[in-house]
Amino acid sequence: MSIDATKTREAAAVPSPGTESTKKRVPQGHKRLLTRRDRITLAFMAGVPTVLHVALVWVTALASIALAFTSWDGIGFDSIKWVGLDNFKQLFTDNPQFWPAVEHNIIWFVVLILIPTPMGLFLAVQLDKKIRFSRVYQTAFFLPVVVSLAVTGFVWQLVYNPDTGLINSLIGANKPGHYIDWIGNPHLNLWAVLIAASWRHTGYMMILYLAGLKGVDPSLREASSLDGANEWQTFKNVIFPTLRPTNTVVLVVTIIEALRAFDLVFVFNKGAQGTELLSILITNNIIGESSRIGYGSAIAVVLLVISLAVIIPYLIATFRKERRA
């Protein structure tokens, strides 16, 4: 009996899997999932982008707003002078390029919303039918979006060249006395640039609408076909109403694209002779021999206000939908 009692005491001394000593070791293992090296790596990966974002976006935006009420030539901080609303008064009343630039930005938006947007929707509908080589077509139509706008501008410069350009060669306007200067003519150059912008914007709209069409419930199409609706009636009465969220995104993206248009125009003719844009005016006043950073910042603030007037309602509507969901 003494031997059995000794074995019983030894077995009782060995902790079972559910004892308190075992439970205490489990949290310690969880605490060691992130080592000191892991925490440093995470802090570096999250901290560096945050610092760059704050420095390059928020600090510069706030600095532009502050400089809009000053006069500064960019040489030394001692030369900054407070002028109040003088920059805005001069901008709205004395600058002959400001209102034409606003008009051109509006024309840019109208053209993008009326031509490449419906064309992108049409291409998306056709590619959504799962035709042969649809991936090849998607790549071909989306390729202009991937290419840099500066490169796109150089390509279209070759197309519009009055002597050896493709368009003049096709219509026979590349002979002396019959040249059509698509870039130098102030009555044509804005529309020439808009054709190049529309060529690129079509692929962008195609991808957005194609993503929206992939989210349409297939049962809606089946129910519509059972009711005897043809393809056009199905699209108009069933498919297109379900694309309302996509249409909102497309509208906001198109407005932003129209406001931030810069690269193509700058490559074509630096925004001169009928292609003035707000972004071009900002660049010309801030960068140059006679820098007027305060005045250029005032134009940037006007562009910022117009952008926020579009973006803020969109964000409010989006947040409301998320709360309801």
Image: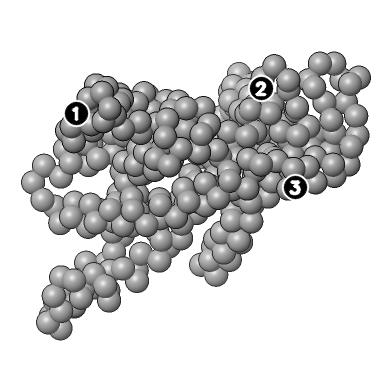
Residue, x 80% and y 46% (percent of image)? 89
Expressed as whole percent of the image width and height from the top left, the position of residue 251 reads 46, 57
As measured in the structure, the alpha-carbon distance from the residue carrying label 3 to the one carrying label 1 is 44 Å
The disc placed on residue 93 is: 3
Three-letter amino acid code of the residue under disc 3: Thr
> Disc 2 or 1, which lies upstream in sequence?
1
For label 2, the residue is: 287
Residue, x 40% and y 52% (percent of image)? 111
Residue, x 58% and y 33% (percent of image)? 280
The disc placed on residue 160 is: none
Three-letter amino acid code of the residue under disc 1: Ser
Between 55 and 125, which is closer to the camera in this rendering?
125
As measured in the structure, the alpha-carbon distance from the residue carrying label 2 to the one carrying label 1 is 37 Å
Residue at disc 1, secondary structure? helix
For label 1, the residue is: 169
Expressed as whole percent of the image width and height from the top left, the position of residue 117 reads 35, 54
Q: Nearer the viewer, mark 2 or mark 1?
A: 1
Residue at disc 2, secondary structure? loop
Q: Is residue 57 above or below residue 202?
A: above
In the displayed structure image, the side of residue 261 where residue 93 appears, left or right? right
The answer to whether any part of residue 245 appears in the image is yes
Expressed as whole percent of the image width and height from the top left, the position of residue 30 reads 58, 34
Three-letter amino acid code of the residue under disc 2: Ile
Q: Is residue 13 above or below residue 126?
A: above
> Disc 2 or 3, which lies upstream in sequence?
3
Kindly indicate the quadrant of the structure image that contains residue 298. Answer: top right
Q: Residue furthest left?
A: 132
